[in-house]
Image: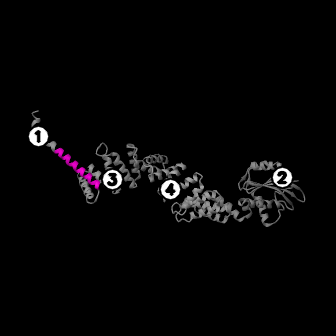
Amino acid sequence: MSLVLPLLPVIIIAAVIVLLYIFTIGRKDHNLGQKVQKLGGRERATVIREANRRLGQNPRDVAALQSLGEIYYNDEDFEKAMKTYAILVSLSGGNLAIDEYEVTVRYALSALKCNNQEEAYKSLLLARNMRGDGFDVNYNLGCLEYHRKNYDRAIELLSQARVMQPDHPATLRYLGLSLFRARRYAEGAALLKKAIDQEPEDKEVLFAIARCYHELGQNEQAIKVFSHLRADPQLGPNAALFAGTIHLQTRHYPEAAQDFQLGLKHESVPEDVLLELKYRLAVTYIKQEEIAEAIRLLSEIQASSPDYKDIQELLRRYRELNTNQNLKIYLISPTSEFVSLCRKIVASYFADSKVKISDVSIQKSEYADILADITTPKWEDLILFRFVRTEGTVGELIVRDLYTRTKEVKAGRGFCIAAGSFSEGARQFVEARLIDLVDKELLTHHLSSLDSGAPIESSPTAIDPA
């Protein structure tokens, strides 16, 4: 006790000095904070100068860092803001003077503005672990998940953001796009329409709405939007591709051709879209029997991408059809022209014959049956001809059905004629039956005879039924 009493005045003086120092620092921090709130003209410059002076003395001065961070963030100088908040984040652990959640969010948003998405993503995750109800965190993290193609996670985050701000345009946009990408088309369309009401010129959202309509089978609405977007420099080629595809599927071939042609007129078309536009335009030309134009486009595709889809087979096939009008009619012309050609084949099939066609029946676009009374100087018989419209392999089922049909109509013989080949099973089936198989080679022979006008004197299938 005797030792403490002499030192008591010294202790009191020291305590007063410490209190005065704390009070002074507090006033300076308070004044600095007040000036930050004003952020104008000379006061802003004073705050920056004072903060930098203090940081020169102590680089970990929290008040100075907070003042600079506030100024940089509000001035949208995000590069400097990001560096400042990075220091504050590192100092925030256990420091009650720092709001760890706020500085983490500010750091993340600054990083996002600096296009440092990786840092932004990690920091937003940290912030959300601290507090999951922040709009900025849920919205921005949801957008990042969308761009990372994690659509289900994006939907979860953006839905939470929308609870806090139901009419926030960007939230509606990205939530709608995420639902579209997750193939939840009805929900996506509903939100995207709300987004487009607020931002009518958002072409990406319009395109997504049209895609939703298309996937939902609402093609009339989809066509309207796709057609509107065909002229857009960025989305136009894709919009034209979708519009043309819908028209092609619904057999509106002139409209489909126009769509694809408009898509090809764009100066900058992605390679994959360019190839598909040419391919589908070629298919449209084939449907319109404009074979020469189809071959031109298919040849262009072959030159740039030889293995694209089935262009090698298409080129082989349609180059042949382009030089053989009757084969073209047989395979791809309208049904009326096909049946007319089949009647000509029947009429000239046997040399020196009289033909009376008693029945013609058509099975969709697959084949036509013609029943005819044939009279020659040597024999007379009722014969059933089946003309199959394929270049592929005709199987046993078609031939069996033809055999059954010959029995029903009491025909003495049947002929199955195709522009392709016959399976082994089909050939085995007719071995002991009065059914003749006529493949592409023999059919071509008959078609050539029609062109020349010469009778078929010695057709390999003109066997005397008697």
Residue type marked 2? Arg
Residue type marked 1? Pro
The residue tagged 2 is 413
Q: Position of residue 413 (x, y in %)?
A: 84, 52
Q: What element carries label 2?
A: strand
Q: Determine which quarter of the picture holds residue 377.
A: bottom right
The span from disc 2 to disc 1 (Cα, nearest Å) is 134 Å
Please say if the residues under marks 2 and 4 sit with CB atoms less than 8 Å apart.
no
The residue tagged 1 is 9
Q: What element carries label 4?
A: helix
Q: Mark 3 against mark 2, which lies toward the viewer?
A: 3
The residue tagged 4 is 205
The span from disc 4 to disc 3 (Cα, nearest Å) is 35 Å
Q: Which of marks 3 and 2 is nearer the N terminus?
A: 3
Q: Mark 4 against mark 3, which lies toward the viewer?
A: 4
Q: Mark 2 against mark 4, which lies toward the viewer?
A: 4
Q: Mark 3 against mark 1, which lies toward the viewer?
A: 1
The span from disc 4 to disc 1 (Cα, nearest Å) is 77 Å
The residue tagged 3 is 83
